[in-house]
Each structure stands twice: as C-alpha cells, then as structure tokens.
Amino acid sequence: MPGPVLGRYRLLLVDLDGVVWRGSRILVENVEWLRRARSLGAEVVFVTNNSTRSRRVYAERLTAVMGYPVEPRDVVTSGYAVARLVRERSGESRVIVLGEEGLVEELVLQGHLVLSIHDPIRCPVDYVVVGLDRGLSYQKLRAAHEAVKRCGARVAVSNEDNVIPLERGDAPGAGAVLAALLASTGARPELVAGKPEPYMYRLVLRERGVEPREALVIGDRCDTDIEAARRAGLDSVLVLTGVAGERGERCPATYTVASLPELDATRSPS
Ligand SMILES: [Mg+2]
C-alpha cells in the first residue's frame, strides 16, 4: 500500500550542506521537517563528506541548529568513516595525515597513532590518510610521499570529491589533495570511505540494526548522496535546496522535492 513518506522510514540519513544549511544560512524549512520527523519517531543521523571537523564539533553545532541534543553518535563524517575503515581492514595503525584537525581527532579516537610530519619519517607507516586539507604544504606532501615510497604505506581517503561547492563558485576538495599525492607516488587509493561509496550508510545501518528498506537517504547531490544511496540499495530524496537544484541536475532518486515539507504531499512509489 502506498503511504506518506513520514512514518514509513525508521532511519533518516541526512546530508548537511545543501540540506540542513547552505554555507552559513540555515535551511529552516528542511530543519523544521526533520525535527517533526524525529518527534514522530524517526532516528536522524547526519552523514557528511566533510572531514575537516570532528563528529563532536558537528554535534555541538547541530544541537544549536536542530534545537534538540545531537550526540556525536548521530553524526558520521568521512573522517570518522575512514578512521573506522582503516581499523576494520588493518587494526590500529601508524598513519601520516594529509588533512585537518577533525580528521586527526577521529583517527586518534579509533586508536591510530598519528605520526608527526615535523620529525623524520620512521617506518613502518601503515597508511597515509587523506582528506580535505586547507593547510596543505609541500612539507606535508613530501612526508606523505616518503611514507608511501620508502615505507610502503597504503593510501586511504575520506572522499574523492575534486571540488567542494561554496556559496560562490567552488574550491579544491579532498580529491585534489589526493591527486597531488598520487601524481608523485604513482599509488592508488586502497580505501575510500565517503560518498558515493556506500560505506558510511552501511556503517550506520549496521551500528543501529536497521534494515535497508527502513532507511531513507536525504541529500542535495546526485553524484554523491543519491549515487551512494543507489549503491547501498536505499530509497532516497533529492532535495533541490543545494547543488543539484542550483545546477538544474536531476537523477533517479526515489523522491525529488523542492524542500522537505513537500514530502508530506508525496505518496510512496509502492
Ligand atoms: Mg550536500
């Protein structure tokens, strides 16, 4: 029986930029709808490809925005995800980081040893972990290069977005940082955590004991959010308050809406 979207899904997997906020502007309609979905019993988990901030920092900001206590466990960043992925594959590891504070914090929380790039590189180094790094320097890149070439470190990356959308235009993303390392080393990334890989969504489902048919992805981008939902076998909402809306892009999401309250007037496909 077709039914309304709200109440049909137990778990909402919600992207941040373009859904909850756009740069510094809060997307109030979407936020109010999410708040209502939660009050009706849906679990809301925020899932972002941005690795620069930790789950703890996002949880603080989201608590202020959403108006209810958002815990770090309600947030998955690609930084947290890559730290989990490295631990699942190789256990607690010795790593060099091309990335920011948020990524370092998540790696340390997963028990990895983050090596300083200011000291001479001492093998073994198990992984170079790459994320968006707005403080990227030749010194960092050289340390990572050395870890790969001399120590045989493998490459793990938060996500492969080449650009990140800004309020005006765009800027180099984690993929661009990765490209610099790959150019000098000839390495290939062995682990990729972020969207469009389905790992982050699967991780949340596993942690919360939720079946794929009970989860709904909500995102503003076709090439990351909606594609990752497709790979994970999840229903999805393309909400046109972000990148796809701005660019006039469309993709086969389960639902496409101008903003989330429009879902109330939408019936499920089957
Ligand atoms: Mg987004």
Image (cartoon, helix red, strand yellow):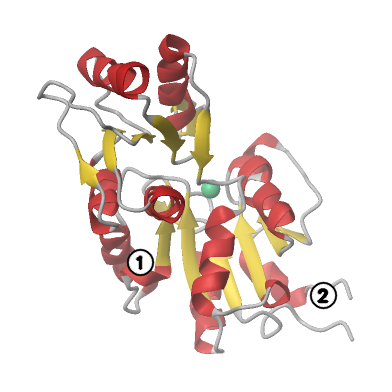
- Alpha carbon distance from label 2 to label 1: 29 Å
Q: Which residue is mark 2?
A: 268
The number of callouts visible is 2
The residue under label 1 is which amino acid type?
Val
Q: Residue at x 82, y 75 (%)?
A: 268
Q: Secondary structure at mark 1?
A: helix
Q: Is mark 1 within 8 Å of ligand 1?
A: no
Q: Residue at x 81, y 51 (%)?
A: 252
Q: Which residue is mark 1?
A: 65
Q: Residue at x 70, y 61 (%)?
A: 236
- Determine whether, in the image, residue 252 is placed left or right of residue 174: right
Q: Is residue 29 visible?
A: no
**CB atoms of marks 2 and 1 within 8 Å:** no
Q: Residues within 10 Å of mark 1 (few under 14, many from 20)?
A: some
Considering depth in this image, is 124 or 226 the residue closer to the camera? 124
**Residue at far top of view:** 184
- Determine whether, in the image, residue 153 is placed left or right of residue 95: right
Q: Secondary structure at mark 2?
A: loop
Residue 31 tag number: none
Residue 182: image x %, image y %? 46, 18
Residue 234: image x %, image y %? 71, 64
Residue 38, compared with residue 140, is above or below; it is below
